[in-house]
Image (cartoon, coloured by chain):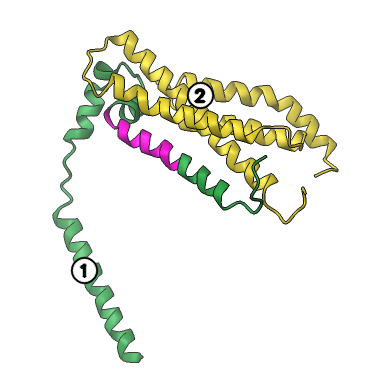
Amino acid sequence: MNKLKTVSIIILILVLVITVFVLFNYSESDNSTAEYYVENSEKDTAATNAVTAIYLNYRVYDSIFETLILLVSVSAVIHFSWRKDHE
Amino acid sequence: MNDKSFLISRFIGFMYPIILLIGVYIIVNGHQSPGGGFHGGAVLATVFICRYLENPNQDLRIHYLEIFEKILFSLVLLLPVILLFNNISMNVISNKAYLLIMNILIGLKVCTGLSIIFYRFVFYEGGGLWN
């Protein structure tokens, strides 16, 4: 038991070290997509709000599946209801 | 909830149109100011919760709300497929109309979905209180 604890602590420290290494080496982020959205969103989609331009035009798949998630959760709530009758 | 509070019911009657107005404003102005369909729909669902607090009866047809939500989801699916994925060239007015219609559809869909979940939990759970 004590040995297992020691091994798990060593693994945790190793993972943390690897995470810090990766973060410090690959954190030169590429901002070209964000800069494109900020510069061209109003011209492309006629939306003053850049967030709306993203979620209704550039990333519309995301909105569609987000509404699908709500539909599926409503179906799950109906299916697992305590009373089984409709109306 | 048969013995409802007088204060809560009066205050909800006062707040009811204001909540409705805020929800519609957030949905309709979603492409110009912070907001949009999801937030506005959540605000509009509050109206149904207020309706339950004011008048807890079961005359709301949840079944029709479910059908309405499915129709709205198919419209949300259909509109970008027709307008965006075919690479139709759109000008400023048609783009704004598309954003407005999509925001309204998503707002109504989120509103009906959250209301269905709330009314299901209120009326259909809870160990036979409403039988």
Q: Which mark is residue A17?
A: 1
Q: Position of residue B45 (x, y in %)?
A: 59, 33
Q: For the residue carrying disc 2, how many other residues have a C-alpha within 10 Å: few (<14), some (14-19), or many (20+)?
A: many
In-image side of B28 versus B121 (left or right): left
The subunit carrying tag 2 is B
- Number of labelled discs? 2
From this view, report whether residue B47 is shown above or below residue B4.
above
Secondary element under disc 2, as helix, strand or loop, is: helix
Magenta segment, prevailing SS (helix, strand or loop): helix
Q: Quadrant of residue A36?
A: top left
In-image side of B62 versus B69 (left or right): right
The subunit carrying tag 1 is A
Q: Which residues are magenta?
A: A58-69
Quarter occupied by the N terminus of chain B: top right
The chain assigned the colour green in the figure is A
| Amino acid identity at mark 2 | Ile
Q: Which mark is residue B26?
A: 2
Q: Is residue B47 visible?
A: yes
Q: Quadrant of residue A64?
A: top left
| Amino acid identity at mark 1 | Val
Q: Position of residue B71 (x, y in %)?
A: 48, 27
From this view, report whether residue A81 is shown above or below residue A8.
above
In space, the residues marked 1 and 2 are separated at their CA atoms by 46 Å
Q: Nearer the viewer, residue A50 or A17?
A: A50
What residue sits 78% from the left and 36% below the top?
A: B8
